[in-house]
Amino acid sequence: MDHANGWGLARGYAAEHGFRRGSTLAAIPARFLTPPARQATRWRTAADLLNEHRWKRFYGQTRFGFNVTLPQEGYLNFGPWPLPAAGVLAGLLAAGGDRWLWRRGARRSCPSGGPPGQHRHQHWVRGMPGVARPPATSRSEGGASQGFRTGARLTVASARRLHPGIPPVLPGGPGWVYAVCALFAAGGFVKEPGATLQWTLAYLFLGGAVDLAARAVTRAAAPRTKGVVILRSNPVAPDPRVERVARTLARGGFKVTVVGWDREGAFPELEGTPFGILVRLRTPGRYGGGTRNLPALLRWQLHLVYWLLFHRRYYSMIHACDFDTLVPALLVKLLLGKRVVYDIFDWCADTVRGLPGFLRRCLARVDRWLLGWADAVILADDNRLPQLGKARPRRLEIVYNSPDWDPKDVIRGLPPWRGLRLAYIGLLQADRGLLELLEVMRRHPEWELDLGGFGAEEYLIRKAAAALPNVRFRGRVPHHRCMEVYVRADVLLATYDPSVPNYRYSSPNKLFEAMRLGKPIVVAEGTGIDRRVKAWELGYVVPYGDTDSLETALQDAAGWTGEERRAFAVRARRIYDEHFSWRIMSQRLLGLYDDMLTSIAPPTSSP
């Protein structure tokens, strides 16, 4: 009835007053006001004009009137010529919405993705989907490699071929019901555009509220899962602490996935490991770029959030390593109710290069504020407690960078060397005293240095090392090979620049690896670990950048007798076993995760 009456009103109004030339379309935002409020302004919608033309004052007093369709509004503004376009637009919008819903439902029913009818094969490792690969050409080729299994997923189209009566699958979630209503309210476009806009927004807001409430109820009754995802902003090739934590959690019965950042695209996107799977997200970036690397970091964090949301069913806890992974982890916690453990390897505000003092202080404040939202915080050393300032984490654990391997399992066999053998494998940066070390090696050709790693000054250090025949440059070294190098060394080195704020609280792996191996270590004054080295007599402390002091310390180590080396090794290993062993650290780590797991609601019975 409204449709027929509306055409009569539109034709009568146009004949008496002429066409509006788009004025009612410009007044669509005024549709959110009441009719009396619109009357007090110059804005008139198509419904206002036609109903005032028909009902006069009665319309403003009762707010009763006819509805106006999109073709009628087009006629009212521009005459009869836009009527075919209005019909085509309404049809296209409705058809496009229908197609989108169909494809969306098909993807939800087919976790491997792809349009209906298209099978995709994926690598799966311990239940986690990886990167896609082409389908196998034969039964033998379709078999999964070691540590992998391959499986095809059922699509809506293939199910409908078996059962033609099956309707398209609507994506789950109560919010989707309202989203579909909003889509068809906008797509059908059978009402006045202003009213359509109102109903669409109302559906979306109401649906969002219902969906959030449903998510809260679902999170409260979510079943426990022992899935842990560890986030790290490097390719984990290697990263000793990340791998050590992952191995420990895997041995404790947790399903572990590590997600790293491959900035150069130089590593496999998916790699099977003894502790689980290693996923590397490829986002171009640079190492040691400081603030210049911020755009790349933000792109990677968005990629990381998408990955976490897409794989949300496979984990209940997130182990965020350092500040650059904390923000994505807390965002996912807010959306999905996951537990977050914040593992502080290095204090972010003290590590970013080129950051002005004001921004450095702001970043530290943000870090201290956000760590209070994490469910637990882990520090690599108790000497980092002053960096937390007034922050009050919900739970705090100290987990040292102690190695989890046994020296008896490390392969030996390096040809004998008559002089002193030194070893450094880690970040290749000038602020780690490496150029001074190479100068000492130039003075003592009878000594040998194993040098390896990667970093911002790799080219400079590699070039200086290439000129010395007694320096063996190994480049990037896997962690298990790194231990082989350390076993065959006489002295380890960790001479960091104390003028770098973060180094004043350093707790490098090398110190604990040296204790585990019974080797002396050389460290710089004022770097946090110097106090521990002095207190336990674990090696030498030298002023940073003092080449002569470094040379004197190494000369003293070169003069040790075999008996002195054995006595030192026995004492250092005893200190390690009693105070710093990974056996103690693993108990702290697993105790933390077990407590977090029990804090999650127990499983609910399936219907």
Image (spheres, rainbow, N blue to C red):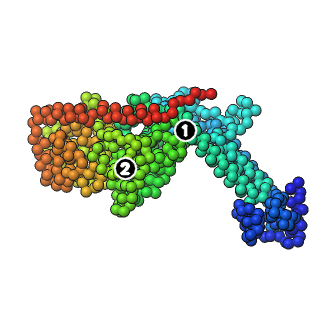
Instruction: State the quadrant of the C terminus.
Output: top right
Residue 45 x, y percent position in the rendering:
77, 65
Distance in Å between CA atoms under marks 1 and 2: 28 Å
Q: Earlier in the sequence, mark 1 or mark 2?
A: 1
Secondary structure of residue under mark 1: helix
Residue at left 50%, top 50%? 302
Residue at left 39%, top 55%? 365
Q: Residues within 10 Å of mark 2 (few under 14, many from 20)?
A: some
Residue at left 29%, top 43%? 381
Is residue 388 visible from the viewing direction of this image? Answer: yes
Judge depth for marks 1 and 2 and give the one in front. 2
Q: Give the left or right position of residue 149, taking residue 208 as reference.
A: left
Instruction: Give whichever of 102, 212 is nearer the camera.
Output: 212
Q: Give the left or right position of residue 390, taking residue 2 as reference.
A: left
- Which labelled disc corresponds to residue 391? 2
Secondary structure of residue under mark 2: loop
Residue 220 x, y percent position in the rendering:
54, 37
Is residue 263 visible from the viewing direction of this image? Answer: no
Instruction: State the quadrant of the N terminus.
Output: bottom right
Residue 253 x, y percent position in the rendering:
43, 29
- Which labelled disc corresponds to residue 219? 1
As shown in the figure, which amino acid type bears the numbered disc 1?
Arg
Residue 312 x, y percent position in the rendering:
53, 39
- Which labelled disc corresponds to residue 47? none
As shown in the figure, which amino acid type bears the numbered disc 2?
Ala
> Looking at the image, is 43 positioned above or below residue 459?
below
